[in-house]
Image (cartoon, rainbow, N blue to C red):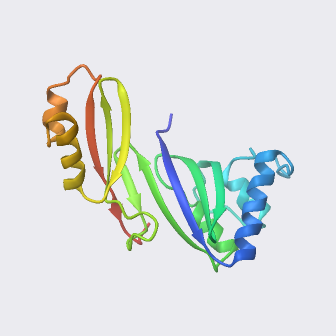
C-alpha cells in the first residue's frame, strides 16, 4: 500500500486554457462528463486523456481532490502515491504555455518537495507537524528557526527531538519537515 502525498499545484497560463481546464475538472467532479474509457473521474490520467494528451511514459499515481481558479491562477489539489507524479509534465505536453508550480508533502517517507524555488506560491521552508495533548496541528513556517521558536512558545522546548523523547506515548509529538526546493523535479 502506498503512502499518499498531498500535492498542491499552482498553474499559470493563458486565461482561456486555465478556464477550459477548470471547467473540465468541475464537470468531471459533478459527473457532467464521463471518461470515455473505464478510468476513474478523479484520476490525473483521465484529465490528460480528456485533453487529448498521452500518459505513455508518465507515472500517473494520483487523484485530483479539488480545484479552483482565482486571480488567473488554477490551483489543483491531489493525493498522489509516495510523491509528486508526472501529471504536471503530461499537462504541459498538452498545453506548453502553462507554468506549473507544486508542493508535495508525504510524512511517512519524509518527502517534502517543491519546484517553486523563488517562493512565488510556496515560500515556506518547513512544515511543523505536531500533536499537542491529542490535538493535531500543522503549520508552515518561513524558516526552521521560526518553527522552533513556535514550538518553544507552545511547549517550552525548541528542539523537537527532545520534546518527542519526553512524550513517548505518542499523544504529543512535533516534527519539523524541511522542504527541498529544486527545478529538477
Residue furthest out toward the front: 153
Q: Is residue 105 above or below residue 122?
A: above
Q: Is residue 63 visible?
A: yes
Total marks shown come to: 0
Would residue 116 be found to the left or right of residue 128 on screen? right
Can residue 108 be seen by looking at this rendering?
no
| Residue 182 position within the rendered picture, expressed as x and y whole percent measured from the top left | 37, 69
The image shows residue 177 at horizontal and vertical percentages of 30, 49
Residue 158 lies in what quarter of the image? top left
The C terminus lies in quadrant: bottom left
Tell me: 93 left or right of 169.
Answer: right
Left or right, 28 with respect to 96, comes to right
Is 107 in front, or is 15?
15
Q: Which residue is the extreme one toward the top? A: 169
Say which residue appears at 65% left-offset and 57% top-offset. 68
Q: Residue at x 52, y 56 (%)?
A: 8
In percent of the image, x 63 and y 76: which residue is there?
13
Residue drawn at x 16%, y 37% is 161
Image side of residue 2 versus residue 128, left or right: right
In the rendered image, residue 165, in percent from the top left (x then y), is placed at: 15, 29
Amino acid at each position: 500500500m502506498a503512502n499518499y502525498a498531498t500535492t498542491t499545484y499552482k498553474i499559470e497560463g493563458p486565461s482561456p486554457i486555465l478556464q477550459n481546464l477548470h471547467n473540465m475538472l468541475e464537470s468531471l467532479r459533478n459527473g457532467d462528463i464521463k471518461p470515455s474509457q473505464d478510468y476513474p473521474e478523479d484520476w490525473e490520467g483521465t484529465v490528460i486523456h480528456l485533453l487529448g494528451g498521452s500518459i505513455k511514459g508518465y507515472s500517473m499515481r494520483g487523484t485530483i481532490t479539488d480545484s479552483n481558479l482565482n486571480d488567473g491562477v488554477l490551483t489543483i489539489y491531489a493525493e498522489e502515491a509516495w510523491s509528486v507524479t508526472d501529471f504536471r509534465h503530461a499537462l504541459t505536453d498538452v498545453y506548453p504555455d502553462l507554468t506549473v508550480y507544486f508542493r508535495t508533502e508525504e510524512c511517512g517517507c519524509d518527502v517534502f518537495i517543491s519546484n517553486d524555488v523563488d517562493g512565488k506560491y510556496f515560500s515556506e521552508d518547513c512544515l511543523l507537524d505536531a500533536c499537542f495533548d491529542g490535538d493535531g496541528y500543522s503549520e508552515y513556517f518561513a524558516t526552521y528557526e521560526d518553527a522552533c521558536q513556535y514550538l518553544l512558545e507552545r511547549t517550552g522546548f525548541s528542539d523537537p527531538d527532545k520534546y518527542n523523547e519526553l512524550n513517548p506515548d505518542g499523544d504529543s509529538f512535533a516534527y519539523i519537515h524541511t522542504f527541498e526546493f529544486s527545478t529538477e523535479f
